[in-house]
Image: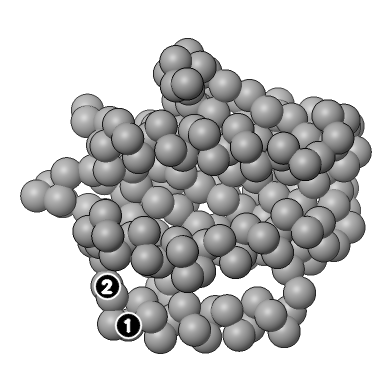
């Protein structure tokens, strides 16, 4: 199976409101977050602006269009996440340990993780899916919510990006590594596999 997106091959889409894209086992960069991690008013405005932009810029994107999207939307979202809003359940190392066990439960079977970080109120993951993406996300969210025992903790949706090429992969690895740079070591967990460790 190919590691990187091939625009001439079929792309599977799922999700009625905000389609998610998968192409077999092509690498994915995924972010999902706790339900209270974003200021509601700001998030609503961000979603409206993003929806309008997406209407005029449907996927698949060129590298230039994707860069424009991330400059305009992703950076703002990540800045809000990194502000540490909400209860930040994953400040607690016991909760991070639960999440780590769940992520790694089917490593090498249903998923091949390359790098991930558990932040206080969100996760970034770079992996090759070996089953439908929505199945993985549903299992990770559902099992973690049940085991942590704080009710429904996750925001319903998630952000996913198919990895285009080796340079895109390396940039995603570096981004995930840098994400917790301003945090204390006891408030996040970073894991890296061999392919990520090879990126300098």
Distance Cα–Cα, label 1 vs label 2: 6 Å
Q: In which quarter of the view is residue 103 placed? A: top right
Q: Residue at x 57, y 79 (%)?
A: 46
Residue 93: x, y in percent? Answer: 87, 32
Tell me the SS state at disc 1.
Answer: helix
Regarding residue 11, the answer to whether it shows in the image is yes
Residue 191: x, y in percent? Answer: 63, 24
Residue 124 to residue 86: above or below: above
Q: Are marks 1 and 2 in contact (CB under 8 Å)?
A: yes
The total of numbered circles placed on residues is 2
Tell me the SS state at disc 2.
Answer: loop
Residue 55 to residue 64: above or below: below
172 or 135: nearer the eye? 172
Residue marked by disc 2: 58
Residue 8: x, y in percent? Answer: 9, 49
Regarding residue 14, the answer to whether it shows in the image is no
Residue marked by disc 1: 55
Q: Residue at x 43, y 71 (%)?
A: 18
- Locate the N terminus and report the quarter of the image it occupies: top left
Label 2 environment density (alpha carbons within 10 Å; few <14, some 14–19, many ≥20): few
Q: In which quarter of the view is residue 17 placed? A: bottom left
Horizontal relation, residue 138 to residue 184: left or right: left
Residue 55: x, y in percent? Answer: 32, 82
């Amino acid at each position: 199976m190919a590691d990187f997106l091939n625009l001439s091959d079929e792309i599977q889409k799922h999700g009625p409101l905000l389609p998610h894209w998968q192409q077999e086992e092509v690498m994915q960069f995924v972010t999902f977050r706790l339900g209270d991690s974003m200021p509601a008013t700001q998030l609503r405005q961000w979603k409206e602006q993003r929806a309008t932009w997406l209407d005029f810029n449907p996927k698949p994107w060129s590298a230039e269009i994707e860069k424009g999207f991330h400059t305009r939307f992703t950076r703002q979202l990540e800045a809000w996440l990194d502000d540490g809003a909400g209860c930040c359940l994953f400040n607690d190392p016991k909760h991070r340990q639960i999440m780590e066990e769940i992520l790694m439960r089917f490593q090498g079977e249903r998923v091949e993780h390359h790098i991930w970080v558990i932040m206080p109120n969100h996760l970034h993951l770079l992996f090759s899916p070996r089953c439908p993406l929505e199945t993985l996300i549903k299992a990770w969210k559902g099992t973690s919510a049940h085991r942590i025992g704080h009710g429904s903790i996750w925001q319903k949706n998630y952000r996913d990006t198919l990895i285009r090429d080796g340079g895109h992969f390396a940039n995603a690895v570096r981004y995930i590594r840098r994400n917790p740079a301003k945090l204390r070591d006891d408030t996040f967990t970073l894991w890296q596999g061999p392919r990520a460790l090879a990126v300098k």
